[in-house]
Amino acid sequence: MMCRSFAAMLLSWFALIAPVAGAADYPVRPITFVVPWGAGGGTDSVGRIFALLLERDLGKPVNVVNRTGGSGVVGHSAIAGARPDGYTIGVLTVEIAMMHHQGLTRLSGASFTPLGLINFDPTAIQVRPDSPYAGLGELLNAIRAHPGKLKASGTAQGGIWHVSLCGLLHEQRIPPGAVVWVPSNSNAAGLLDLVAGGVDLVPGSHPEGRSLIDAGKVKSLVILDEKPSRLYPNVPTGVQAIGTRWTMGAWRGIGAPRNLPKAIEARLQAAVRKAYESKEYEDFMHQRGFGLRWAGPDEFAAYMAKADEQLGSVMKAVGLAK
Amino acid sequence: MRLNDTLSGWLMLILGLTIVACALTFPPMPGQNIGPALFPQIIGGGLAFCGVALVRSGRRAGGPAWVEMDDWVGRPRMVFNFALVVGALVFYALAVDTLGFFITGFVFLAGLFFSFGVRRRWIAPVAAAVTLALHFGFYTLLRVPLPWGWLERFAW
Amino acid sequence: MQHVLEAFRLVCDPLVLGVVLGSALFGLFVGAMPGLTATMAVALLVPVTFNLPPLPAIAAMVTATAMAIFAGDIPGALLRIPGTPASAAYCDEAYAMTRNGEAETMLGAGLVFSAIGGLFGTVVLVTTAPALAEVALKFSSFEYFWLVTLGLTCAVFIAPGRPLKGLASLLIGLLIATVGFENPAAYPRFTFGSDELMSGFQLTPVMIGMFAVSEVIRYAVTRDVPLEVPKQGIGRIFRGQGALLRKYPLAALRGSALGTVVGALPGAGADIAAWISYGLSKRFSKTPEKYGTGHVEGVIEAGSANNSALSAAWIPALVFGVPGDSITAIVIGVLYLKGMNPGPTIFIENPQNIYAVFIIFFLANLLMLPLGWMAIKAAKNVLRVPRNVLMPVILLFCVVGAFAINNSIFDVGVMLAFGLLAWFMEANRFPIAPTILGLVLGGMLEQNFVTSMIKADGAPGAFFGRPIAGTLGVATLLVWLSPLALRWRRGRRAARADKVARVS
């Protein structure tokens, strides 16, 4: 009896004094910030600093939530499927342009409201310091001469670094199967296998290889980008090594579910831009060695569409796509 | 509920064979000499083996009945309790996004307290206090986004 | 020496000491909450560390994780909910002790031997970090394969009752581990088209379901059978711990040493250390028959192992910037942010900073004793709560804990399903610990086997082709074969005795 009257009292009380919150005073409560990868990884750390900066601007807590699994499928679906009220946003990673080619999801970059591209890390190729290959040209020649002998690792089967390596080989007219891919759970795990002598090369980004490169356990052979990397300016670019402008890499952006109310979309766009341009973000990215790259909402949408097409054509060419 | 070893053996054998059959449909992965089917097949085979061994030992031991119900099954009150625990969890999973954590948690606790025979006048205050405390610990301190549901406009 | 003094001065800063105390309380809280792991404790601390100078930032993480791993034992012992996966290995043992009225001894042992393990790991970290890190880097998939196989072997030792049912339970765990998309071939298996199942079954909801929910169900259906936990005071938890240390010095040492080695490996952490050392503890114990009935020896060994693994995970992290577990993965990021770049030079460039971190390690593990005592004192009140109030509260805790790990209602369903499965299995005398072990190790087993076979171009001889892999492989085979050999010898001796008896 008491229980019922208590509940009834509560409900009537709520009904009476409930204020109506609209888009004008957004945000009025905490925002959930979905990171589609686990705590401890690169996406997680970029996501956490970005959430902190957004929180400072928006004035309400921005809570990081790791929704992991299925190479990002679960987290990206959580963002795309959330109510478009501005209270669920999250990090979009390069996998969103890859997973649907593999038939793992229907989502693509077009399933989101893009808010801004905040990071890009191009592919670099790492080998052991005592490896016989002085440059990318020699490595490619060795692959050409002995197809199936060299082994590479650094991500799961069909992950970005796998596709990236295949894309490079394809562009150089080497059959992608000429390097055997050893799947690994993370780039760090692949690098450890490289150090332990299990594989011969590991494509990946410079920040991921940084600690082992600094420790002298791993050598970076080439960075496949137009300009040298900020962390290791002495590592030759693709053009310097073999004259190729071919590039591919991992990127991260901020996105929200589709059909966001215009006022909220504008508020979030401004907040994302402000966070990106803040000194803290720049310092953080430089400290960690992550690459800065900005694209506003429209350019980000175009960027995702282009990446989607490029990745898709490589994946189809090498048989990774359905 | 206790199953006769022979019966659990048969169930396990069926499960193992089903898994092996499912795994046969997994395609090989080009570039990998061991496909995704091998491990499920080994596990399914292992389960089938355990099943056969259980059937044999169950036969040898002999058993009175295929299925032996625990004595609580005869008592409606206990059957109700069992259904209640399962039902409470199902209720929580279905309702929490709509009703929000406060209402769902309160109803969840109050219902279980009531049928476990907690004194009536304690039910509402304890349920409310525990719900609030859990919300404070997980939502406020640990930033777990417990849903607000109907109470969204009061969210803090 | 001058650096050490300087380091002490750095640590004695009021801000540092304040942060250590605050994060210790935070770590105890997170560890005792089901569903929130020590990794989560660190992830939640990250935004706080942005505003702190380097040393307090690191100190916060060191202290919080050490406390969290210990605190995971408390709900495991009192409520059969392992607070963190690292406590799952001996959760049943601890709960059995509480039901025997020995909660005091259990929690005291958990606390004291956690501290001992943590200190042991720290000593190794301080003294031999560079050398041990070099060895750890020699581990590739071949070595990990044997390590995982050795871990799985433990299932046979830890399972009470018939080995056949233990094996079946292990296979069920391995089967659960195959679900999802995260396998070497990246092929979605047994997902039935569900997005949520793509990531497979997460350990935490399964664990909470199998241990805690099954216990609540059991309570619900036997409610009129008085299930009395003996009246027990938890006051003097340190009483008798000295005697335990004198009685089981070998267990504490073996647990700490094994934990340190496993923790230092980049591919294995505190959970696996606890499982393997609990299994080995039973294997080498003089009284293996007591395991599972509330026997403290395994708790001592595994409890020290998980804390020493935690300290040792910092070895590859500091020396090569290679994470020893998911906790140090976050820590490495913070180290970079604070300009203390990990690598061999960290010992040369800022020696006073790194010594200060070592001092924090000792401090945290010593502080664990008084703070852990307070936490136990506070938690013991749980046993005074009438069970008809306690059980629904536990159930709601489980629900929120299962939700918290991935913020998904799906995991609440997973928890319920596995709660029912475990309840059914236990009613039919299938042990559940091997299932959890299978789930913990299944993915690693397949990953390391498949990648090894790719690397070896399909030649199985490679599993013995490297020095460490060969040694581990032979050791594993010996552990497997020794019970068979023993039984065979015993059988022959019995046959001979039989023959002698017949002749005479």
Image (spheres, coloured by chain):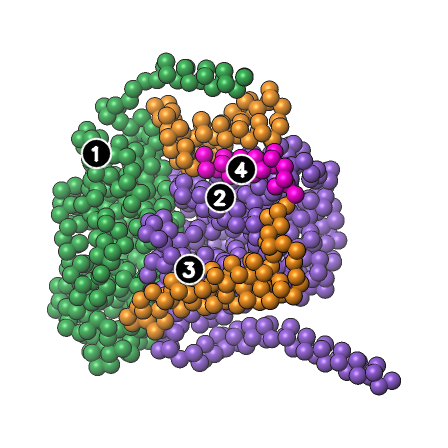
User: Residue C46 is drawn in which quadrant?
Assistant: top left
Magenta-drawn stretch contains C263: no
Asked where in the image residue C257 lies, by quadrant, the reply is bottom right
* N-terminal-most mark, 2 or 3: 3
Residue to which mark 2 is pinned: C416
The chain to which mark 1 is attached is A
Residue B64, quarter of the rendered image:
bottom right
Q: Which chain is green?
A: A
Identify the chain drawn in purple: C
Cα separation between marks 4 and 1:
42 Å
Q: Is residue A207 above or below residue B82?
A: below
Residue type at tag 1 = Leu
- Name the element at disc 4: helix
Amino acid type shown at disc 2: Leu
Residue A37 spot, x, y in % from top left: 34, 50
Which of label 2 and label 4 is nearer to you? 4
Q: Where's residue C268, x and y in %?
A: 48, 60
Question: Mark 4 sits on what residue?
Answer: B83
Residue for badge 1: A260
The percent position of residue C203, horizontal first and vertical second, equals: 47, 51
